[in-house]
Image (cartoon, rainbow, N blue to C red):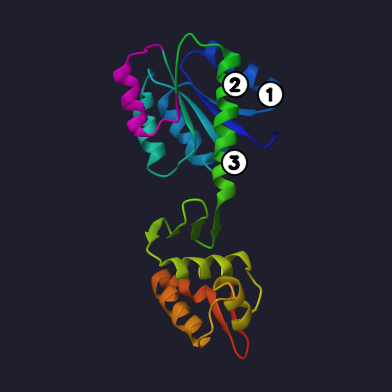
């Protein structure tokens, strides 16, 4: 909990203090911005530290929609929009831009904190299903792989083989072991089929294909060094 940092963006000092006090009671750290421009500056400086953004819609200099657009150009950090307007069209617009939650003022701080906890828990679950290996991101629930943010198409066997290599990062794997674990003991052909699959995977990974090392006389190893 102590590692969670929330950026609170609202032009009303009273609202910022209220949110900061309630979040502090839950063990969250906070950063504050009173307008959209400062929000962007703070986010750019601390994007790797900020776990969630509480963002007011109506603000001076730069409104919440504009801030949200800039954040979404480079980050999927959860964003909760706060607004005095509760029109359905506004909410739909927010979700189209990538809002995770939409709360109208006046709001219950306790309810807001509960929503924040639910969002962070959901994010933790998603991150547990996804892991980044030197720019290769594998999502085990969605069964997808991307390289530097670009999705790549893999056959089922290619996906399973790459997944096995990644799960055993820095471990030298013999062809026999790979066959037993990826082909599940039901393959009785030439182990050179592994080599052909590795060749295809390397090609699809592009420059990242170099992470799959050939271990002479053994098999293969995945390492990002």
Q: CA distance from mark 1 to mark 2?
A: 8 Å
Q: Tell me which corner region of the image, top left, top right, bottom left or bottom right, holds residue 204.
A: bottom left
- Give the total number of marks visible in the rendering: 3
In percent of width and height, residue 107 lies at: 51, 11
Residues under numbered marks 1 and 3 in contact, where contact means CB atoms less than 8 Å apart: no
On the image, the x and y values in percent for residue 172 come to 65, 78
Measured along the vertical axis of the image, is residue 185 above or below residue 131?
below
Residue receiving disc 3? 124
> How many angstroms separate mark 2 from mark 3 (CA)?
16 Å
Residue at the spot of label 1 = 26
Provide the secondary structure element on which disc 3 rests: helix
Report the residue at 36% width, 12% height from top: 85
Quadrant in which the N terminus is drawn = top right
Residue at the image point whose x is 48% and y is 13% from the top: 12
Quick check: marks 1 and 2 in contact, CB under 8 Å? Answer: yes
Residue nearest the viewer, comparing 173 with 147:
173
Residue range (magenta): 84-101
The residue beneath circle 2 is 113
SS label for mark 1: loop
Q: Nearer the viewer, mark 1 or mark 3?
A: 3
Look at the numbered disc 2 and give the secondary structure of its residue. Answer: helix
């Amino acid at each position: 909990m102590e590692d969670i940092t929330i950026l609170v963006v609202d032009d009303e000092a009273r609202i910022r203090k209220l949110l900061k006090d309630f979040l502090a009671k839950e063990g969250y750290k906070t950063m504050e911005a009173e307008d959209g421009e400062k929000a962007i500056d703070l986010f750019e400086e601390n994007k790797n530290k900020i776990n969630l953004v509480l963002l007011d819609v109506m603000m001076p200099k730069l409104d919440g929609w504009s801030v949200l657009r800039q954040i979404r150009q480079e980050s999927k950090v959860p964003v909760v929009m706060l607004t005095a307007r509760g029109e359905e069209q506004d909410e739909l617009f927010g979700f189209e831009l990538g809002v995770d939650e939409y709360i109208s003022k006046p709001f219950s701080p306790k309810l807001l904190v509960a929503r924040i906890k639910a969002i962070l828990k959901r994010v933790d679950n998603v991150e547990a299903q996804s892991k980044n290996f030197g720019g290769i991101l594998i999502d085990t629930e969605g069964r997808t792989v991307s390289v530097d943010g670009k999705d790549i198409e893999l056959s089922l066997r290619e996906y399973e083989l790459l997944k096995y290599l990644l799960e055993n990062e820095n471990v030298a794997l013999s062809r026999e072991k790979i066959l037993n674990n990826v082909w599940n003991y039901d393959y009785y052909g030439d182990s050179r089929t592994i080599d052909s699959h590795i060749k295809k995977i390397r090609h699809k990974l592009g420059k990242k294909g170099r992470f799959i090392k050939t271990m002479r006389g053994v098999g293969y190893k995945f390492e990002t060094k």
